[in-house]
Image (cartoon, helix red, strand yellow):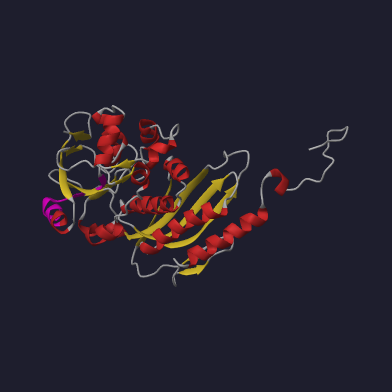
Amino acid sequence: MTQDANGRPTESMSYDSSGVDINKADNVKQQILQALESTLDSRTLGTGSFGSLFHFAGYKDPVLVSSCDGVGTKLKIAALMEKHTTVGRDIVNHCINDILCSGAMPLFFMDYIASAHLEQQQVADIVTGLADACRENGVALIGGETAEMPGFYAQGVYDLVGFVVGVVERSNVLDGSRIAEGDVLVGLPSSGLHTNGYSLARRVFNVDNDPSQLQKWMPALDCTLGDALLEPHRPYHTLLQPWISSLHGLAHITGGGFEGNIQRVLPAGLCARIDRNAWEVPNLFKMIEEAGNVDRDEMYRVFNMGIGIVAIASQETANALVERTADACIIGTITRQDGAERVILI
């Protein structure tokens, strides 16, 4: 850009010349509105304005439960693979699982997508995943925001954040207060890494320096490494909804692993003892442990190790849940705390 003697630009400046294309952003937003329409029902009173309106009824004493989270560096795998539909599913399902731990069923979802420049096909793929997950889970995708931020994000990099609001009858709120000595822990299988541990996984497989690793066929996984790493986060609310009133607690196994998440729902004085031999750890986790020479305890601190959510209930309820739920298994018990540890893996 040329300047005059006083340092002022000699050419007219615009938002477009600074790297933000308002017309393209408007086109992207129209695509998003078309995608979210397929997730709406009679409870949605209005979208597309400065705020979205949602009406819910049929609850005696409702409690709203909300959560906000991001996909994390799994997004880098998606960018290297040029596959962006799965990450939309990831953030919807992750957020649903978070509010499920309070006993809540999801009502509506909103998203935030930010990048240096909005790439229409990329955004369309992300929103397709968002809309598909919302529609499958009976959640209204009522709006969101796209932000074009040149000079802040590197080219080709984007961030994806989700916000969910759900509802639960106050009498059915899960807060861990009913957990007692003698209760049993039931593990429900994950679909993969879900959305945690990707900084370590990327380093172990050296994918940042050698993206071709993602295209390698892995016989032990029956797919490429990239497809295994992009397997979407699994939701559990449909499966567990009939059991909510009988459960004493739920823990979503995300960042921090078993120790960091189960202790969040334990009452004072109680300890969760988990038998690591109670389930078969999926091959992807074994590959990470071996290829990176990762300490076993570190693996259980970082990854879900094949257990996506842990339900805590009486022995009777736990037995019934395992009997009626495919691949669920009893993985531990609740005991009196003896020492500083709240969660012990044996």
Name the image quarter holding the N terminus: top right
x, y percentage for residue 230? 37, 46
Range shown magenta: 307-320
Name the image quarter holding the C terminus: top left
* Residue 281 within the segment the image draws in magenta: no
Q: Image quarter for residue 172?
A: bottom left
The residue depicted at 13 percent of the width and 56 percent of the height is: 323
**Residue furthest out toward the bottom:** 42
Residue 263 seen: no
Whether residue 279 is situated above or below residue 167 in the rendered picture: above
Residue 295 seen: yes
x, y percentage for residue 36? 49, 63
Q: Image quarter for residue 263?
A: top left
The residue depicted at 61 percent of the width and 59 percent of the height is: 27
* Residue 312 within the segment the image draws in magenta: yes
x, y percentage for residue 270? 19, 38
**Residue furthest out toward the right:** 5
Q: How many labels does the image show?
A: 0
x, y percentage for residue 109? 44, 58
The residue depicted at 21 percent of the width and 54 percent of the height is: 247
Is residue 76 or residue 47 the one in the foreground? 76
Q: Image quarter for residue 224?
A: top left
